[in-house]
Image (spheres, grey):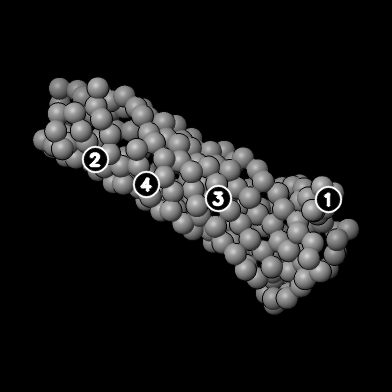
């Protein structure tokens, strides 16, 4: 199992000309918070102490951001809207390679990451608009593992995930109506984790 802390950067921009052709509004989110999860994998150590392996990770994240200002393309704040974001579940499938120094194993890792991200905003009149989507991207990181005993290991690592950009997203209001079809956004996540595992 593992526990960690995530800090993300996300941006949502409205380019729907039917909404306002002269003003492309946007939010810049910074969801951050703790998370808890589990991982499992397989490693093989070669005779020259090089270690190669694969692993899968899954975690529930409590990262969020509230009271995010709504900005126009001039950078001014529009007080009629307040944004929020939530980084929920995270997962990854990774390959890793390292070099064993007795009980220590520094390593690098890379692979595919998946995350569930929700964002939206509330209008001063009380209407809330939101969207939730599952994002897939690439991930890379590094870490170090230490053997506490022949069966138990602990580790510390950092993983950076980039989910790229999406466009033509629909936000839904409280009644389920779709709005702002021209919206596009981006998402990146950096996560530091501490973990402990049992070796079979």
Mark-to-mark CA distance, 1 and 3: 23 Å
* Disc number lying in front (1 or 3): 1
Mark-to-mark CA distance, 4 and 3: 15 Å
Residue furthest to the right: 18
How far across and how far down the image is residue 35, in percent?
Answer: 44, 48
Discs 4, 3 touching: Cβ within 8 Å:
no
Q: Which residue is mark 1?
A: 175
Mark-to-mark CA distance, 4 and 1: 37 Å
Q: Which residue is mark 2?
A: 154
What residue lies at 25% left-to-right and 35% top-to-bottom? 98
Residue 87's label in the rendered image is 3
Q: Give the image quarter of residue 65.
A: bottom right
Name the quarter where the C terminus is drawn: top left
Which element carries disc 4, helix, strand or loop?
strand
Closer to the N terminus: mark 4 or mark 2? 4
Q: Residues within 10 Å of mark 2 (few under 14, many from 20)?
A: some
Q: Give the image quarter of residue 74.
A: bottom right
Which element carries disc 3, helix, strand or loop?
strand
Q: Which residue is mark 4?
A: 3
Q: Residues within 10 Å of mark 4 (few under 14, many from 20)?
A: some
């Amino acid at each position: 199992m593992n526990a960690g802390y995530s800090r993300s950067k996300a941006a949502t921009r409205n380019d729907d000309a039917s909404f306002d052709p002269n003003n492309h509004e946007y939010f810049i989110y910074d969801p951050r918070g703790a998370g808890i999860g589990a991982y499992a994998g397989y490693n093989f150590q070669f005779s020259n102490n090089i270690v190669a392996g694969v692993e899968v990770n899954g975690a529930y994240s409590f990262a969020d951001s509230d009271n995010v200002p709504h900005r126009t393309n001039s950078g001014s704040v529009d007080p009629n809207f307040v944004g929020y974001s939530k980084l929920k579940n995270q997962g990854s499938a990774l390959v890793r390679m390292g070099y064993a120094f007795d009980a220590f194993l520094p390593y690098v890792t890379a692979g595919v990451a998946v995350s569930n991200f929700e964002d939206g905003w509330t209008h001063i009149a009380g209407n809330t608009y939101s969207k939730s989507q599952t994002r897939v991207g690439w991930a890379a990181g590094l870490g170090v593992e230490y053997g506490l005993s022949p069966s138990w290991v602990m580790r510390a690592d950092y993983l950076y995930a980039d989910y790229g950009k999406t466009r033509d997203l629909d936000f839904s209001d409280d009644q389920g109506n779709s709005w702002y079809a021209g919206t596009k956004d981006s998402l990146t996540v950096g996560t530091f984790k501490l973990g402990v595992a049992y070796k079979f």
